[in-house]
Image: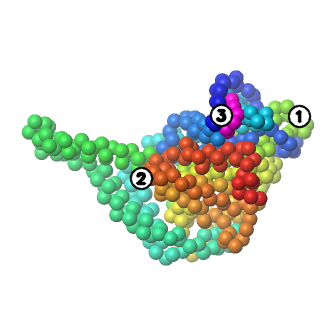
């Protein structure tokens, strides 16, 4: 039975941020709320949309109890910076246990809006497919991980899938791009807008224009976001936007990881607000979340004040293209071993398992061609470690676009999210 959701508006509160350079060392709380930091995916343009999806997903999995939802603003320190927070209070009817979960979002959608055109996104998509096809013919590729160069096998069927996609995508994308120009030319130059004389043409042109509109919209809003953020293997005009998106992720993470418990804020012995943090990324947001965690762990290596890896309870990726970005958009320039090793240094999560959340759960649907199992972020299968990626196959069968967008409403995602915030992952996945 789904929990009874009771939304409540709460007043804004003031919050003190922890600064390891100027503050006394902070300790970890023995108990308290769990924080969830969410990075939305491509095409999710509405503010708070993803927070609403996460709140409903967790509450839907909380059967046999009630859930109260509060929305409030949190003011950081004495300045005017505020962030939005959703607070869940989950109460169990059977045991009377109450759990508190605080939800935050790294919202980056406005930065990519209108930043790329149709033909630029189309060229990026087709070129990535072609380069991936050529690379997949070799059967394997190099990736620097865990202190050395690893030879990784290209997944079975990759070449065939890319070849099929190119044969289908190339003509469809070209048609969608040219449809408006062709129709406008025929209407203006050939038919001179004479509807009565050429009714068959207007009947054929209308569905063509509608299909062209939706294809163009999908490419710009979805593939455009990917082109802007993921093409970091080259220097282009989107470099600044990528840095700004990463900055948004890092600021949101700083809010969560630097927050002090209100009862101890400003005291000689400060205590962190959150002993457990769950980071969730959907679609391209999983890549943003991955970069955010790596940046956070790098900074913590220098200051060693946030205990970021120790407090990161789970990293949940939904419909993630991380394996595809590792393969298709890796920085490959000849035999540049030193450059590849330096590129790996900015990713502590593939340097050592000690720089990872306790759990990395990857949920992927079989019908979702954007996502898949994550095989390129771990040591070989014979090297066991509890912080390896745990793949969860979502059995849904749907059209690829629906399979990719609908994770929040499906049981696999709901249960993983709920188990992550209620300490249930060990019971499901073992020690």
- Residue found 79% across the figure and 44% down from its top: 275
- Dominant secondary structure of the residues highlighted in magenta in the image: strand
Q: Quadrant of the C terminus?
A: bottom right
Vertical side of 33 occupied by 381: above or below: below
Report which quarter residue 108 is drawn in.
Answer: top right
User: How far apart are labels 2 and 3 at the CA level?
Assistant: 43 Å
Is 411 magenta? The answer is no
**Residue 412 in picture, x, y percent from top left:** 60, 49
- Residue found 74% across the figure and 53% down from its top: 427
Residue extending furthest left? 197
- Residue found 36% across the figure and 44% down from its top: 214
Q: Which residue is mark 1?
A: 267
Q: Nearer the viewer, residue 386 or 321?
A: 386
Which is in the foreground here, disc 3 or disc 1?
3
Q: Nearer the viewer, residue 71 or 100?
A: 100
The residue carrying pointer 1 sits among few (fewer than 14), some (14 to 19) or many (20 or more) residues within 10 Å by Cα, namely few
User: How far apart are labels 3 and 1 at the CA level?
Assistant: 38 Å
> For residue 121, which numbered disc appears in the image?
2
Q: Which residue is mark 3?
A: 3
Vertical side of 286 occupied by 103: above or below: above
């Amino acid at each position: 039975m789904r929990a009874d959701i009771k939304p409540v508006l709460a007043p804004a509160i003031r919050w003190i941020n922890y600064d390891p350079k100027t503050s006394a060392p902070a300790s970890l709380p023995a108990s308290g709320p769990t924080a969830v930091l969410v990075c939305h995916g491509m095409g999710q343009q509405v503010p708070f949309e993803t927070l609403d999806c996460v709140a409903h997903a967790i509450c839907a999995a909380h059967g046999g109890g009630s859930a109260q939802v509060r929305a409030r603003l949190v003011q950081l320190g004495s300045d005017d910076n505020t962030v939005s927070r959703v607070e869940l209070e989950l109460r169990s009817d059977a045991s009377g246990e109450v759990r508190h979960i605080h939800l935050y979002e790294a919202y980056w959608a406005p930065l990519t809006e209108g930043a790329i055109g149709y033909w630029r996104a189309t060229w990026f998509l087709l070129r990535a497919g072609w380069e991936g096809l050529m690379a997949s013919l070799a059967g394997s590729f190099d990736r620097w991980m865990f202190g050395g160069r690893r030879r990784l096998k290209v997944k079975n069927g990759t070449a065939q899938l890319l070849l099929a996609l190119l044969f289908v995508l190339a003509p469809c994308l070209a048609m969608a791009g040219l449809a408006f120009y062709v129709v406008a030319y025929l209407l203006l130059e050939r038919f001179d807008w004479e509807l009565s004389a050429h009714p068959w043409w207007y009947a054929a042109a209308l569905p063509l224009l509608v299909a062209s509109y939706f294809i163009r919209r999908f490419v710009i809003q979805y593939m455009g976001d990917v082109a802007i953020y993921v093409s970091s293997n080259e220097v282009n005009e989107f470099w600044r936007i990528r840095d700004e998106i990463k900055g948004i992720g890092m600021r949101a993470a700083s809010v969560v990881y630097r927050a002090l418990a209100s009862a101890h804020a400003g005291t000689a012995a400060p205590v962190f607000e959150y002993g457990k943090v769950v980071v969730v990324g959907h679609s391209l947001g999983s890549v943003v979340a991955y970069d955010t965690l790596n940046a956070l762990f790098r900074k913590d290596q220098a200051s060693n004040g946030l205990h970021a890896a120790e407090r990161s309870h789970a990293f949940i990726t939904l419909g993630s293209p991380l394996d595809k970005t590792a393969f298709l958009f890796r920085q490959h320039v000849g035999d540049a071993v030193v450059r590849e090793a330096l590129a790996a240094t900015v990713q502590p999560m593939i340097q050592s398992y000690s720089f990872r959340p306790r759990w990395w759960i990857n949920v992927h649907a079989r019908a979702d061609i954007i996502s898949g199992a994550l095989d390129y972020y771990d040591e070989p299968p014979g090297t066991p470690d509890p912080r390896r990626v745990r793949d969860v196959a979502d059995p849904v069968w749907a059209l690829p676009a629906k399979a990719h967008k609908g994770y929040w409403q499906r049981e696999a995602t709901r249960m993983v999210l709920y188990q992550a915030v209620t300490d249930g992952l060990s019971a499901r996945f073992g020690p």
